[in-house]
Amino acid sequence: MNKTDKNWLSPCGIDCSRCSIYLRTEEELEYWKKQGVDINTIRCHGCRSDRTGIHWSPDCKILQCCVYDKELTFCTECMDFPCNVLKEWEKEAEHHKKALSTLHEMKKTGIEKWCNNHGYE
């Protein structure tokens, strides 16, 4: 199994290296084109990239709270996990639901053990 750097795992549990926005898949670009968005603006270097650079959601409440306000690596480290922000966010999209499920697994198994079991280093 190829190992993936765990820095690609966002605080909310999304694997940025597999994100369709990061990968700029044809389907993703076509979706945004239909929404009237300039597809040249559909770029992201991951949630742990420089927020002032190319970042899809520089105003993400989850990233702000977890990393910048509480100085945590993943939401699972927070005393309030899962908070109301995550619970509401989960309802927005299927990949959000999957990400929150990942966080629950990480919480149960431990971050390092979960990462090792899932091919992250």
Image (cartoon, rainbow, N blue to C red):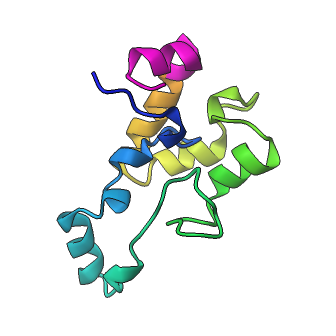
Q: Position of residue 84 (x, y in %)?
A: 64, 43
Report whether residue 59 is seen.
yes
Report whether residue 82 is seen.
no
Considering every residue shown, the one lying at the far front of the view is 2
Q: Residue at x 63, y 28 (%)?
A: 76
Q: Position of residue 52 (x, y in %)?
A: 65, 69
The image quadrant where one finds the N terminus is: top left
Query: Which segment did they paint magenta?
Result: 106-121
Q: Position of residue 106 (x, y in %)?
A: 53, 21
User: Is residue 107 on the magenta stretch?
Assistant: yes
User: Is residue 73 on the magenta stretch?
Assistant: no
Q: Position of residue 45 (x, y in %)?
A: 48, 59
Figure label count: 0
Q: Is residue 71 left or right of residue 95?
A: right
Which of the 4 image quarters holds residue 35?
A: bottom left
Q: Residue at x 38, y 21 (%)?
A: 118
Q: Main secondary structure of the magenta part?
A: helix
Foreground residue, 20 or 84?
Answer: 20
Q: Residue at x 44, y 38 (%)?
A: 99
Q: Residue at x 38, y 73 (%)?
A: 42
On screen, residue 63 above or below 14:
below
Q: Is residue 116 left or right of residue 53?
A: left
